[in-house]
């Protein structure tokens, strides 16, 4: 028997996989489904994905999560904020999907800065190879034969929404995170498009996050035909929404594949150093902040490259390998026996936007093993998050409330490390998958089930308080981390 009642689905198309979660009208989780997809990284700077695989994973997740219910009331979408692919006139992919971790356009940054000096001021995007604008320039100059055949450039979300609904749209948030949208006018920027030998015709129509679309007849999803679909926004913006962050004095903290700290403002918030990004969210709300390139992906790298046997054994025994990593790290004292990790496996975003920076273990000795390495990875990631915090401090009140979401909230140890490094209380959201929750909130709001987005208040699962002694220790760890960064920065920049 099918279950009755209003059901909203929040879909999150992430860098590492697709997740769909069903919520009731009280935004309580009912069921979920997750499918991991692959990233091809066979050479330096490369990160490429198969859009067909991602679409297939989405269909599987939607089919599984919607099956128990008589009717689905609405579906909201979240996706990775930065991704791009080229398609032909029929919407068939001519390129792989390039997610934000792709660094192949790093040699194009100098040209962007020289020929588009107002790029940052107009778009809110610091020049960096993760942005679709740079990836398109790379395609144009390095793969001209393919570039000439491309009729439109799509994000992974616009590609999937077109296949589901027949409508080719891009929500203003994803568009704002492309480096192609004028964040003040909320339209594709003519100067940047001309620079790329493109026009508005080469991109989807820009819509609000609450634009109503409808699922057409899709193989495998007959039960969802006619269900309203809403484009939603980027994963980071929806995590901020789900944390109750659409108000002043709140800082949202997320660590998934990457990591970010965010604040909401009523107008574009930029800085002279061009180190803060700023993307449009909804109507008179923008979200600004800083993001690190290497969050949970560092542990995934460790799992896939250095712990394959343990991961396979854990899978056979029905154990989550990341729980084992957490246990190992917890057996090591703070400071990881003086092992420092600079987590730049895929270059750097905030605060220095250096795509050439690379990861290092500093102080590695015979007395260090996998447990110490994992602890140093967790500490290194949080040191980079602290560096972003320092960047945002001038715009924050003296007392700021930090709310945490994302996969890292499954690790109390990682949260405690953050509280100690930040010297701040961390409030942990009950819903770990905040991007999916945020997508469901958009669907509910669009259908009039919520009065406002600003008024949403999340359920808090736990409050993490800094440990005074460890705060002192981590102050020294952070100082060493920053000192090592400065010493090595020139080496990786060719200086």
Image (tube, helix red, strand yellow):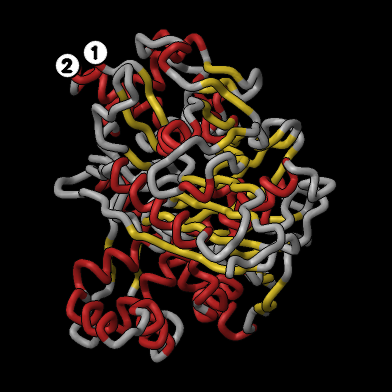
In the drawing, does residue 131 fall left or right of residue 490?
Answer: right
Q: How many marks?
A: 2
**249, above or below 430, in the image:** above
Neighbours of disc 2 within 10 Å: few (<14), some (14-19), many (20+): few
Residue lying at the far front in this picture: please name it. 1
Q: Secondary structure at mark 1?
A: helix
Q: Nearer the viewer, residue 298 or 480?
A: 298
Residue 80 visible in image = yes
* Place of residue 109 in the rendered image (x, y in percent of width and height, measured from the top left): 34, 27
Determine the CA span between mark 2 and mark 1.
6 Å
Name the residue: 23% across, 43% down.
45
Give the residue number, with chain letter if any, for mark 1.
148
Q: Secondary structure at mark 2?
A: helix
Tags 2 and 1 touching, CB below 8 Å: yes
Image quarter where the N terminus lies is bottom right
* Place of residue 455 in the rendered image (x, y in percent of width and height, measured from the top left): 82, 52
Neighbours of disc 1 within 10 Å: few (<14), some (14-19), many (20+): few
Residue 126 visible in image = no
Name the residue: 46% across, 72% down.
477
* Place of residue 260 in the rendered image (x, y in percent of width and height, measured from the top left): 53, 53
Name the residue: 31% across, 50% down.
346
In the drawing, does residue 119 fall left or right of residue 293?
Answer: right
Give the residue number, with chain letter if any, for mark 2.
145
**277, above or below 336, in the image:** above
């Amino acid at each position: 028997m099918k279950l009755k009642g209003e059901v909203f689905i929040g879909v999150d198309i992430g860098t590492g996989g697709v997740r769909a979660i069903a919520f009731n009208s009280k935004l309580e989780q009912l069921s979920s489904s997750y499918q991991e997809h692959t990233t091809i990284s066979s050479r330096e700077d490369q990160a490429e994905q198969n859009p067909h695989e991602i679409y297939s994973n989405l269909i599987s997740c939607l089919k599984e999560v919607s099956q128990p219910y008589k009717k689905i009331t609405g579906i909201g979408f979240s996706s990775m904020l930065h991704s791009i692919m080229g398609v032909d006139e029929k919407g068939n992919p001519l390129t792989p999907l390039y997610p934000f971790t792709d660094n192949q356009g790093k040699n194009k940054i100098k040209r962007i800065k020289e020929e588009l000096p107002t790029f940052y001021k107009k778009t809110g995007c610091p020049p960096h190879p993760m942005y679709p604008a740079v990836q398109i320039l790379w395609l144009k100059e390095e793969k001209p034969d393919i570039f000439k055949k491309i009729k439109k450039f799509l994000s992974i979300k616009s590609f999937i929404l077109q296949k589901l609904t027949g409508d080719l749209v891009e929500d203003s948030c994803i568009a704002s995170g492309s480096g192609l949208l004028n964040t003040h006018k909320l339209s594709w920027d003519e100067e940047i498009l001309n620079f790329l030998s493109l026009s508005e015709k080469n991109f989807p129509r820009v819509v609000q996050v609450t634009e109503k679309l409808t699922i057409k007849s899709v193989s495998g999803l007959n039960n969802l035909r006619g269900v309203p679909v809403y484009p939603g926004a980027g994963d980071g913006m929806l995590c901020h929404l789900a944390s109750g962050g659409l108000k002043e004095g709140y800082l949202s903290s997320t660590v998934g594949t990457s990591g970010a700290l965010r604040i909401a403002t009523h107008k574009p918030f930029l800085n002279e150093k061009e180190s803060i990004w700023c993307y449009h969210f909804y109507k008179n709300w923008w979200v600004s902040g800083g993001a690190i390139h290497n969050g949970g992906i560092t542990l995934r790298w460790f799992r896939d490259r250095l712990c394959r046997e343990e991961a396979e054994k854990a899978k056979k025994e029905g154990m989550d390998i990341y729980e084992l990593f957490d246990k190992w790290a917890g057996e090591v004292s703070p400071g990881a026996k003086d092992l420092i990790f600079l987590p730049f496996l895929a270059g750097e975003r905030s605060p220095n936007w250096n795509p050439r920076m690379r990861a290092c273990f500093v102080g590695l000795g015979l007395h260090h093993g996998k447990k110490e390495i994992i602890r140093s990875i967790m500490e290194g990631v949080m040191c980079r998050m602290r560096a972003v915090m320092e960047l945002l401090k001038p715009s924050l009140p003296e007392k700021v409330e930090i709310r945490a979401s994302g996969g890292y909230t499954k690790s109390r140890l990682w949260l405690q490390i953050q509280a100690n490094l930040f010297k701040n209380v961390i409030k942990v959201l009950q819903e770990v998958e905040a991007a999916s929750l945020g997508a469901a909130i958009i669907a509910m709001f669009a259908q009039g089930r919520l009065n406002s987005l600003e008024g949403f208040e999340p359920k808090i699962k736990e409050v993490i308080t800094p440990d005074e002694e460890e705060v002192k220790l981590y102050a020294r760890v952070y100082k060493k981390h920053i000192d090592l960064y400065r010493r090595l920065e020139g080496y990786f920049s060719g200086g």
